[in-house]
Image (cartoon, rainbow, N blue to C red):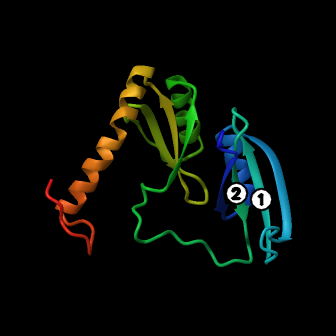
Amino acid sequence: MLQKLHHVAYRCTDAKETVDFYTKVIGLKFAHAITNDYVPSIKQFSPHIHVFFEMADGSYIAFFEVPVSEAAQKDPNTPEWVQHLALEVADMDALAEGKRRLEAHGVEVVGPIDHGMCHSIYFFDPSGHRMEMAARHSNPAEEAHWESDAYKLLESWEKRKRAENWVPGKEAVPA
């Protein structure tokens, strides 16, 4: 049923600043913008602009500027490194170029980090969203192995978190 990601949408603090960052620094195509005073799906008054940047596969990363809403707040219970959007690049040369471009624009970059399945760099966009650029370096045999182990790792994780009492209100299960 599902074929690919159409778009993912985040809130931004300033649409112009966001367009400048994602076109001039990241190199994406500014493909579409929509502005409304009412949210079409719920008919609620909330003036906004919705901006879209096209990826090579035809999917989009999109942002809403909603100036009459209260300022966005980070979830104080979620570590800063957890919520992020990973954007794939073609190879290690493209990853190095991404890092160079970000740093040339004064953006602090962490990495590259080798995750086994990819090498990644991490940075924050102007609205404070944690972003990742990732270059795959796996092969089909490795990917098949990861897929066959995924449920085993999940089951092991479930047992461990209960055994170590990380889940309040749930019984510990012997490991």
Vertical arrangement, residue 135 with respect to residue 150, above or below? above
Q: Is residue 12 above or below residue 19?
A: below
Name the residue type under label 1: His
* Residue drawn at point x = 36 percent, y = 33 percent: 148
Residue drawn at the location 37% of the way across and 36% of the way down: 115
Q: Amino acid at mark 2?
A: Phe
Residue drawn where x is 70% and y is 77% of the image: 69
Residue 110, position as x, y percentages in the image = 43, 43
- Quadrant of the snapshot with the N terminus: top right
Q: Quadrant of residue 34 in the image?
A: bottom right
The x and y percentages for residue 142 are 38, 24
Number of numbered callouts drawn: 2
User: Which residue is labeled 1 in the image?
Assistant: 50
Q: Earlier in the sequence, mark 2 or mark 1?
A: 1
| Dots 2, 1 in contact, CB < 8 A | yes
- Left or right placement of residue 37 versus residue 19 in this view: right
Front one among 89 and 94: 89
> Would you name the residue on which mark 2 appears?
63
Determine whether, in the image, residue 156 is placed left or right of residue 24. left
Q: How busy is the neighbourhood of tag 2: few (under 14 within 10 Å), some, or many (20 plus)?
A: many
- Circle 1 crowding by C-alpha within 10 Å: few under 14, some 14–19, many from 20: some
**Which residue appears at 41% of the width and 65% of the height?**
78
Q: Quadrant of residue 153?
A: top left
Q: Quadrant of residue 3?
A: top right
User: Residue at the front extreme?
Assistant: 1
